[in-house]
């Protein structure tokens, strides 16, 4: 397998310019699959905190850059949807959130909100010993004794320190959701209707918002809460709507410039 990543072939979610250079850094093994953005891309190309891979490695070795509460030493570590990135020395905190067009963007958050992260339940299964395992969208596994209240497509808020469940949001009509892929990526609305498709086809979700709403497939929506929206949104806390629902780069020398 190649150690190089051409810019023209990176996933649509990567926030990189495709025609400025031929190659970019390749994501390493880790969460989020092929859509995960290498941490170096965010540090260098998005935030501008480093100018090269060498600088990124130096910064990471200071243990002052945390992802979901853990110090990261690999600049190729994949970063994806809803990850929390903390710069402890700068006292800056960001949540990775889908932007218009499906690109991942960094949303500034308060330090108090950086202690936990959101995850969508992709799978639920019973494991050896009788407990149940909930697998989230980023590959995180959470064990619970009783999984009767949890279902696939629900969302959980996970504490970054002890990995415990802080909150649970049910996927149902009336739930606040955001689209994370497709032409409506980044849109937020309340589920108006979930149309179940017979057979192997995807279920359809209709959501309403102040712009008239949107329609997308079930796989593209994630249940969130009002903390994920702007203060002036109709879904912000205190509004009527909220009250109703409680690789290495190819050229090392060029990369170091």
Image (cartoon, grey):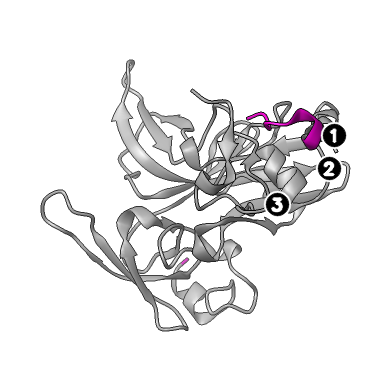
Residue under label 1, please give it: 55
Q: Is residue 27 visible?
A: no
Report helix, strand or loop for mark 2: loop
Mark 3 neighbour density, 10 Å: few (under 14) some (14–19) many (20 or more): many
Tell me the quarter of the image containing the C terminus.
top right
Q: Residue furthest top?
A: 129
Cα separation, mark 3 vs mark 1, equals 20 Å
Mark 1 neighbour density, 10 Å: few (under 14) some (14–19) many (20 or more): some
Report helix, strand or loop for mark 1: helix
For the residues labelled 2 and 1, say whether their Cβ atoms are less than 8 Å apart. Answer: yes
The secondary structure that most of the magenta stretch takes on is loop
Residue 226 sits inside the magenta stretch: no
Residue under label 2, please give it: 51
Look at the image and give the residue range highlighted in magenta: 246-254
Residue 249 sits inside the magenta stretch: yes
Q: Quadrant of residue 7?
A: top right
Report helix, strand or loop for mark 3: strand
Asked whether, in this view, residue 111 is left or right of residue 233, the answer is right
């Amino acid at each position: 397998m190649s150690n190089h990543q051409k810019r023209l072939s990176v996933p649509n979610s990567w926030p990189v310019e495709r025609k400025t250079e031929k190659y970019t850094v390749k994501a390493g093994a880790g969460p989020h699959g092929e859509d995960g953005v290498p941490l170096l891309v965010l540090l260098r190309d998005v935030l501008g905190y480093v100018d090269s891979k060498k600088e990124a490695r130096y910064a990471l070795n200071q243990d002052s850059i945390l992802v979901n509460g853990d110090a990261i030493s690999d600049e190729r570590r994949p970063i994806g949807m809803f990850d929390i990135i903390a710069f402890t020395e700068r006292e800056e905190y960001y949540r990775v959130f889908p932007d218009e067009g499906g690109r991942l963007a960094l949303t500034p958050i308060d330090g108090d909100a950086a202690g936990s992260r959101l995850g969508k339940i992709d799978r639920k299964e019973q494991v050896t010993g009788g407990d149940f395992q909930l697998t989230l969208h980023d590959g995180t596994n959470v064990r619970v004794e009783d999984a009767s209240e949890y279902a696939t497509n629900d969302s959980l808020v996970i504490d970054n320190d002890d990995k415990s469940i802080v909150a649970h949001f049910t996927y149902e009509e009336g739930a606040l959701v955001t689209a994370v892929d497709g032409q409506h990526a980044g849109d937020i609305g309340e589920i108006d209707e979930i149309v179940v498709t017979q057979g192997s086809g995807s279920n359809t979700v209709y959501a309403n918002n102040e712009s008239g709403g949107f329609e997308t497939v079930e796989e593209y929506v994630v249940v969130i809460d009002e903390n994920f929206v702007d203060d002036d949104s109709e879904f912000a806390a205190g509004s009527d709507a909220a009250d109703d629902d409680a690789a290495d780069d190819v050229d090392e020398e060029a990369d170091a410039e």
